[in-house]
Amino acid sequence: MDLPDFKSLTDQESPIYLQLYWRFRNAIATGKLAPGDRVPSIRSLASELNLARGTVEAAYQILSSEGYLIGRGPAGTIVSPQLDGRIGATTPVGSSVLRRPNQVKASGTRPLQLGLPALDAFPRKTWVRLAGRNLRSMNIGDMVNADSNGYEPLRRAIAAYLAVSRGIACTPDQVFVTAGYRGALELIRRTLFQHGDTGWFEDPGYLHARRFLEDAGMQLVPLPVDDDGLNVEAGLRHAVDARFAVVTPTHQSPSGVALSLPRRLALLEWAQAQRAWIVEDDYDSEFRYDGRPLPPLKSLDHGGRVLYAGTFSKVLYPGLRLAYLVVPEQEIGKFRNSVAQLGSSPVLFQATVADFMEQGHFARHIKKMRSLYAARRTYLVQALAQVFGELLHVPERAGGIHVLGYLKPKYNDKAFAAAANADGLAVMALSEWHIRRRSPIGLLMGFANIATPEQALQQVRRLRKALDG
Amino acid sequence: MDLPDFKSLTDQESPIYLQLYWRFRNAIATGKLAPGDRVPSIRSLASELNLARGTVEAAYQILSSEGYLIGRGPAGTIVSPQLDGRIGATTPVGSSVLRRPNQVKASGTRPLQLGLPALDAFPRKTWVRLAGRNLRSMNIGDMVNADSNGYEPLRRAIAAYLAVSRGIACTPDQVFVTAGYRGALELIRRTLFQHGDTGWFEDPGYLHARRFLEDAGMQLVPLPVDDDGLNVEAGLRHAVDARFAVVTPTHQSPSGVALSLPRRLALLEWAQAQRAWIVEDDYDSEFRYDGRPLPPLKSLDHGGRVLYAGTFSKVLYPGLRLAYLVVPEQEIGKFRNSVAQLGSSPVLFQATVADFMEQGHFARHIKKMRSLYAARRTYLVQALAQVFGELLHVPERAGGIHVLGYLKPKYNDKAFAAAANADGLAVMALSEWHIRRRSPIGLLMGFANIATPEQALQQVRRLRKALDG
């Protein structure tokens, strides 16, 4: 690998960081730097060239945002392995800033990516301090397999949080810490379901849960979703003897509607009468911008039929892979037996989340994010209105961290999503989330990482351009 | 909660730490300290009483080793919740040192516990330093879901390690980092197996893998194990059309025998002819004390039928829950698709293991452990010979981190194990690992945490006493 020649940063007309940027681009375009090559760290390059760190950082930032460089965390920064010869050395900077080469699978995030919290607003310093303390006090108990139902102080903190914030009365023994929502689904499946069991599933419904359950041999019965949420009556008519129902009552995934109270009660009544299980996926109830949410099914569950799942992926960060499941008291024994076969999540992160909750950082962070997300949602919704007008209909929703823009049926949302993603965005087609139904169609977009109205406009314009092809 | 009265540590005849010990015991026996109560940290108690930290630490150590106190990591130390009124205040120290109350479920380890590496010999400082560095450099890429097939530098380090130490030629793309061996099994199941598929399984064979696979709907065909390992001929006779075989060729789990070369070749030939899959669980090949091991099946696998699984649980520590799977090159695509549904392990630990390997700590640690374990194995084997004589037959084995002591058929190994475990030990009955067969019977014992010949003798005497009832 040849590094670019940095010795003559003499062009007095453009800022040093842009000169640096250009030298890297030239080095990549001419093959001096090959895909996969490691580049010097910001600190070492700044020290070598006797520049301020911020100067080098600015250059690296543009190079990264354009997809030339990819941060690999502790392994340093490398030239993007996905780069091919397409990128010329002569493209002017500016128009291409924030434009990534096609199909870059960044280790970071992409514009409009779904399912991510605001990573820029995460209290990283506090987190690193708490985790560092737990790391240094690692003892032998932490080195063997931890309690497979979860680290006790964390289960206690979760039970206290659910009591206060969601009106769910449960003991720490009812709480099981799992490796993400999928870990919770796997635990439920192993404990209560048989291969081939049928279950109600929202149509459209959460794509990853559907794939996971189908792959595990479950037979899903798709039920339509309308403005009152899952159509429970359709379930009673077509599959009254199903063994379970997987639902997102707070903000239906992906439509964002809330399941109405009469339907909640009908669902619980059905489960009670059939001795069926309700999996309540309360994945983003923390983020609600208007009014108060309806109480979760679990808080109305007097018959012990609801398995309540929450996650830290949306409130903290998804790489944590920590979620939790609250099981009915009479099922604790069964769940304990099966969780022992699944193993547990690392104690370090469980203990850090417990500290984060106990010390009040968790509640503070949620509160901050609530107003931040309300603002960021507005940035996106307004930009969509400005750029798309009536082409994209975005209904008001009370919560969540994504928006769903509906398209007229004459369009093809999958083709739109593919075009946008080929251009480096990360939207999803609503019809991907369909099981049997074919309408409505639309685009799912995350807004949590849109920092300013200008950025929203820029990303939405890019989206429009991709769709106009 | 009332803390013991520490203000008058005036008894000049016994050391301060023993006086402290006795005051805690009295406080617990008289109910001043209740099960679950938190006790002061070593530092704060030492500072309050103006004692050296080591003094308080020594007292806490005895109290912990006897089961009165339990460390909860960052949550502090508490009075064991499992304590009931049984423990009198007048038992003299000494005879009862290292004796835990019945049924204590320690968050640490129990004597003779299986499956643990030497936790006292783990290079904790180096580990904490490397992990701390990775923690502080956490970036946005680490906060979103990492590459679901594993952190690239770790996959590279594993491929390099396997090439050197096991003669396995594979690319980093063939390596999948999984959440423990069970994560590897789950990945294989989802990718290659159908519900109800039949597979060969060693009888006796690794208990947790058997339970996991049966629970996932696999039909296991038990095949006998003799001094040449799995009886492949029996498989060919009784279930030639099985879809897979799960084997532990290096040190059969639990017998410790090696699969003979002719049988290795017969097994590979069968898999090739039937297009069946071989899951090679190479769980502790790092620890071999005599001679060179036979090459792994994977290194002889020219037809791409072997899925090779290794783990960091035995070389580093089980709480990490990191293992890896090497898949045949032509199956990479399928595995990539299904691993995306399972999610990934935290980047922090993956990056730390990668650093640990790249910087040579890993190889050094294994080398050290090899001689340590050879010594510790001898401690246990000699103590067993001295205490049990001909009652327990312990064959010589070339490797592994547990020993298997065979009992005469007239005994009941399950009852023996239950008696020993009720007394706070952690041995397992060989017959628990049987599927169809009823003999031989015996006890499985871990030796990695036995620090001295005296400790071995003490633990084995305890075992004998428990068995003699």
Image: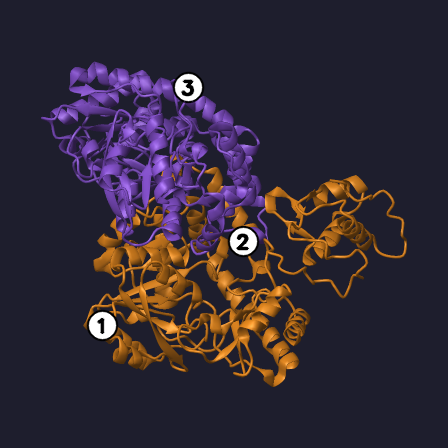
Chain colours: A orange, B purple
The image shows residue B10 at horizontal and vertical percentages of 32, 24
The image shows residue B303 at horizontal and vertical percentages of 44, 40
Q: Which residue is mark 3?
A: B371
Q: Which mark is residue A241?
A: 1
The quarter of the picture where residue A51 lies is: top right
Which dot, 1 or 2, sits closer to the camera?
Answer: 1
Q: Secondary structure at mark 1?
A: loop
Residue located 47% across and 70% down the image: A432
Q: Are marks 3 and 2 on the same chain?
A: yes
Residue at mark 3 to residue at mark 2: CA–CA distance = 40 Å
The image shows residue B223 at horizontal and vertical percentages of 23, 36
Q: Nearer the viewer, residue A269 or A132?
A: A269
The reply, left or right, for residue B136 in relation to residue A18 is left
Q: Which residue is mark 2?
A: B143
The image shows residue B41 at horizontal and vertical percentages of 40, 38
Q: Secondary structure at mark 2?
A: helix
Chain to which mark 2 belongs: B
